[in-house]
Amino acid sequence: MLQWLRQYRRAALPGDISAGIVVAMMMIPQGMAYALVAGLPPVVGIYASIFPPLLYALFGTSSTQSVGPMAIISLMTASTLAPLAAPGSALYGVLAAQLALLSGVVLLVCGLLRIGFLANFFSRPVMSGFTIGSALVIAWGQLRPLVGGAPTAPHLPSALLGLGSLALLVAARQYLAPLLRALRVKPVAADIGAKLAPMFVVLGATALVPLLGLAGRGVAITGAVPSGLPGLNLATSADHWQALLQPALLIGFMVFLISMSGAQALALKRGGEKLASNSELVGLGAANIGSALSGGFPVTGSISRSAVNFAAGANTQLASIITAGLLALALVAPTGWLALLPLPTLAATIIVAVLGMLDLSTLRTAWRYDRADAAALLATAGGVLALGVEAGVVVGVALSMGALIWRASRPHIAVLGRIHGTEHFRNIDRYSAETTPGLLMMRVDAGLFFGNVEAVNERIDEELLDHAGTRHLVLVLSAVNAIDTSALFGLGELNASLRQRGVVLHLAEVKGPVMDRLKDSDLLQALSGQVFLSAAMAWDRLAGSAAAGTPAAGTPAAGSPAAGTPVAGGSPEQAV
């Protein structure tokens, strides 16, 4: 806060005020609806929307991030707490706050220890699959409150109100912004107006409750909402710390991923605003601890609300502070009208909001580009639907890591030839490149480690069988960034095996950091050939002698003592 507050300019104030008002209008129905998704009383959603944005503004680095309740995190909260307590019970509320506290501590500790990089283990396809699965689970769970009963036996007044609200919200999402622009409303104002449609639909449905006596006809409403700010909550359950720890770890990572996803997208729109990932962890951790202390539940940065915050003119975190202040005023003022909010309409707002998250573009891209990533996406979505939120994420991450390990264990290896008249060497399967008898040049396109060194050696053996008469083998290591101990031993064994078969092993284009480590090993002294600065130098030095079946000048023949004397153009000291 000290950084952005010190640089604050009066010209930014109108945008921050307008954004704060707009997001507060969105937050009331959204917060109450997402509290219902979490299995909590609706007012808890407003409690969780006051202190979290204040604390995030103190430590967070995104100027437009809107922190508060969010559908996916609410679903994860419900799935975690449902086996431990009855939704709506006092214990359930205590555990929700306790879960927020643990998640906040996890985020805070990760930020202080600067280990935000761990979140990179959740790939984009896994996140997309998780979002798709969660959105479908949430939408399905809202069908009963939408129609006031089982879908096969709906309550007619509730169904009419819920489906009518759903139709209005879908129409507003599709057509309201274009309609407003057609009426010559400025594009930004038209988009904001369309985003505020849920607020107006909720207000309209709330007005119908007393006008038509819907509560007396069996339409469920939120009920009495206590006025006043939330008190300090210090209640915890000593019997449930261990049961909540593992879900808190997962929720903490999801909070960070969801928040960073939206914040980074908006930072690009703001001209490359710089985000500090570890400061974001601290800010989000503090926000969740604040939610816990006010009797809330886990919160995160909302992608949709943050986008509205940006579009409404937010320039700094002051917009979120204004939003929190307005929500606090809404609780201090008479709250009788909040008690009349019909649950079918809130269910409709949830369904429209979460179905808007069903973005299949990532699946289409992954299916065309990498079927393994597409499989991870589908498995994550299916796992969420069939096994639950936590299990679905674990399945997706496991598949992603498995695909990564599989790809790393089977690196691309190319047989190289020279492009005629140049010093460029390319894959002979892709280019019309010349080769010479007796000389085999191969490029390994991955770091060498314990998981792939055997596969590399096997591929070399296969190529040697296909290139009978090879006298010199040059491994071009331009794409090798590291060689671990297992790979070092593997190269030594390869060198000894080739020596016995009368093939001299050379290295070319070894990167500096790799060469620095090789100097501390015995490989360079035992190497039957030489280290060349470039593939072109290796070609110029070896091509003639390889074709003639004799060792290159200055290069020891196979079976002779290891060469320690560098040849022209290639020495152990010369590394890329």
Image (spheres, rainbow, N blue to C red):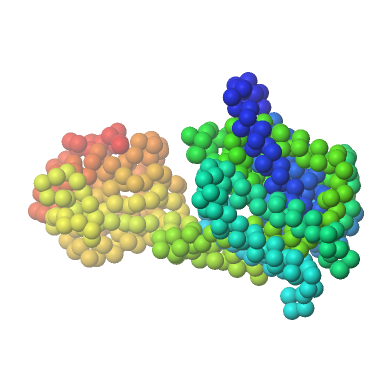
Quarter holding residue 347: bottom right
**Picture quadrant of residue 204:** bottom right
Q: Position of residue 560 (x, y in %)?
A: 23, 48
Residue 139 in view of the camera: yes
How many marks are shown on the rendered structure? 0
Quarter of the image where one finds residue 285: top right
Image location (x, y in percent) of residue 64: 61, 37
Residue 410, relative to residue 303: is it above or below? below
At horizontal 46% and vertical 53% (from top left) the residue drawn is: 450
The residue lying at 23 percent from left, 41 percent from top is 534
Residue at left offset 65%, top offset 61%: 168
User: Does residue 364 appear to the left or right of 121 in the view shown?
Assistant: left
Name the one closer to the observer, 125 or 227.
227
Q: Looking at the figure, which quarter contains the C terminus?
A: top left
Quadrant that contains the N terminus = top right
Residue at x-position 13% and y-position 57%: 437
Is 414 or 127 nearer to us in this picture?
Answer: 127
